[in-house]
Amino acid sequence: MDVDSSLQPESCEQQNGGSCRSPRQRHWEDRDPTEEEATPKITALKLRLDESQKVLLKEREDKMLLSKHIEKMEAEISQLRMKCEELSKSRQEAVTQLTLLRERHQDELGRISEDLQDELGVRSNMDKKLAELRAEMEGLQAENAEEWGRRERLETEKLNLERDNKKLRLQIQDLEEILTRKRRQAVSALDTDLKSIQAELFEKNKELSDLRHNHAKLKKQHYEKSAELAHASRRMEQLEGEVKKLRLRVEELKKELGQAEDQIDEAQNQMRKLQRSLDEQTEMNENLQVQVEHLQSRLRRQQNPPLFGKLRSSRFGNDDTGETGSDPDEDDLQIQVP
């Protein structure tokens, strides 16, 4: 419009010989000088307004880009959270399975210990009988020593399992700490951390499978121990039957109890010494293995002949008694007192 207004007076001057003036030109001639001074300020303000609008557009574009980037980051974070939850669930399942395995092992070991204690109670009752039953009680003591060795092996395996469980708990705690640290790190490093955690979890699953394999082996050993305990129970029933037969003889030997009390007291003292020595004998694995083989051969021989057909003289009697006769297998089964 300024260009048109400037051209219009020129055309009027050309047409009328310079005598024509437009009202707009007259208005500019009549303007106050202060208005002319404000014109550059208005122009500067317009320029600043244009720059501000450009800055606002730039900021809006940056804001849109940031919003898109934030949405993308939130989606990635949600995926990582889902992965972390899955890892937590799998870890919880592993802990639950380990707890169940430990409880089962403890129950089985408790039952075996109770059975062994029952057998020890029966054996201690048999130790109180007459001097003629001492030879047979030595065989029972040898069997008891074997059972003690088995029990200690089971307790050793139990301790090993508890140590493994403790290691697994510590490793699980380490994994939890690792997961906590990984959540606090930058989003760009989460993928690498999750891969390392997955590798560690794979190793833990492998260890869990090994524990399951060991549990199967222990279960098989438990079945074998149950069969052996059933055999021992049958033998104890046979002994109880023969003890009933011996009650009549016990009635006849009541008159000799006064003389036998001193021997029984001495035998009980020796039995206590033997009980202390039984704990030391558990470390002699090679000698125990030889004794177990002789005991098995003796058990096979005793399946047909009567249990009390022949009683050998007790080595725990008085030192002034006659010569004691025993076969080589029974001499090997005798427990050496240090």
Image (spheres, grey):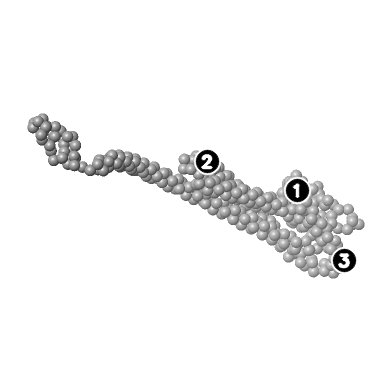
- Kindly identify the residue that appears in the image at 60 percent across and 47 percent down: 214
| Horizontal and vertical percent position of residue 227 | 64, 53
Q: Which residue is mark 3?
A: 259
Q: Nearer the viewer, residue 106 or 72?
A: 72
Three-letter amino acid code at the position of disc 3: Gln
Q: Determine whether label 3 and label 2 are within 8 Å by CB.
A: no
Three-letter amino acid code at the position of disc 1: Glu
Figure quadrant of the N terminus: top left
Q: Which residue is mark 1?
A: 283
| Horizontal and vertical percent position of residue 64 | 35, 43
Q: In the structure shown, which secondary structural element does the residue marked by tag 3 occupy? A: helix
Mark nearest the camera among 3 and 1 is 1
Left or right position of 237 against 78 = right
Q: State which tag comes first along the sequence, 2 or 1.
A: 2
**Residue 196 — which label?**
2
Mark 2 Cα-neighbour bin, 10 Å: few <14, some 14–19, many ≥20: few
State the residue lying farthest toward the left: 16
Q: Determine whether label 3 and label 1 are within 8 Å by CB.
A: no
